[in-house]
Amino acid sequence: MGDPRKFKSKYSGPGHPWQRARLEEERVLVREYGLSTKRELWKINSKLKDFATQAKRLIALRTVQAELEKKQLLDRVARLGLLPAGAKLDDVLALTVKDLLNRRLQTLVLKKGLARTPMQSRQFIVHEHVMVGPRKITAPSYLVPIVEEALVSFVANSSLANPEHPERAIKTKPKATIARAAARPGQSRGRRMPQRRQRQPEIKKGGAK
């Protein structure tokens, strides 16, 4: 009996756990794209580093195999919609984390107007309401190829396929409420506290003796 298989991690975390600038940047991206954990962001970072590592290695090579791998890499990033056709390896090095985050299914569902917020988009995908072409996708991190972008839609038998569904309708404030708020800009928006009545002094019956 051999040694148990050791699974290799598919991503690498940050080299230093406490870097103020990096932590602030991660916090903004996690909130903007509705990520569940920072682990999702680290996976995107690792994929971006893999693209950059391949591009740097291929730039320095002039062999037939290098040309073949170069074509495969550029075709792959073009297929994902990260770069246009005819891009160069230098363009691969210029890719950013946001370029990959914008190709996630969760982001595209939000951009197509199928959800109101990133977290709602994530909920629709996980609950099996979204499909890409003929396939039902339940992974918000799925990178949508450029040819499948137009095929992102709701499942046909899903109640969310109706544009008038309450969860899809954009909630707006009534015009009367907006007008009252504009007419009283100086007043607080908080709940008005009831005024306390002053207690009147009691008058004893019979008068003073």
Image: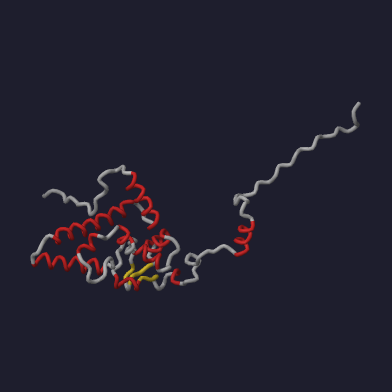
- Residue 138 percent coordinates (x, y): 34, 63
Name the quadrant containing residue 51. bottom left
Horizontal side of 107 relative to 43 (left or right) equals right
Residue beneath the point at 88% across and 33% down: 205
Which colour assignment does the render follow? secondary structure
In the rendered image, the residue lying farthest to the left is 63
Residue beneath the point at 57% across and 62% down: 173
Horizontal side of 160 relative to 146 (left or right) equals right
Residue beneath the point at 18% across and 57% down: 53
Horizontal side of 68 relative to 165 (left or right) equals left
Closer-to-camera residue (208/127): 208
Q: So how many labels did they put on this image?
A: 0
Where does the C terminus fall, quadrant-wise?
top right
Name the quadrant containing residue 94. bottom left
Residue beneath the point at 13% across and 48% down: 3
Name the quadrant containing residue 150. bottom left
Horizontal side of 14 relative to 67 (left or right) equals right
- Residue 132 percent coordinates (x, y): 33, 70
Closer-to-camera residue (138/119): 119
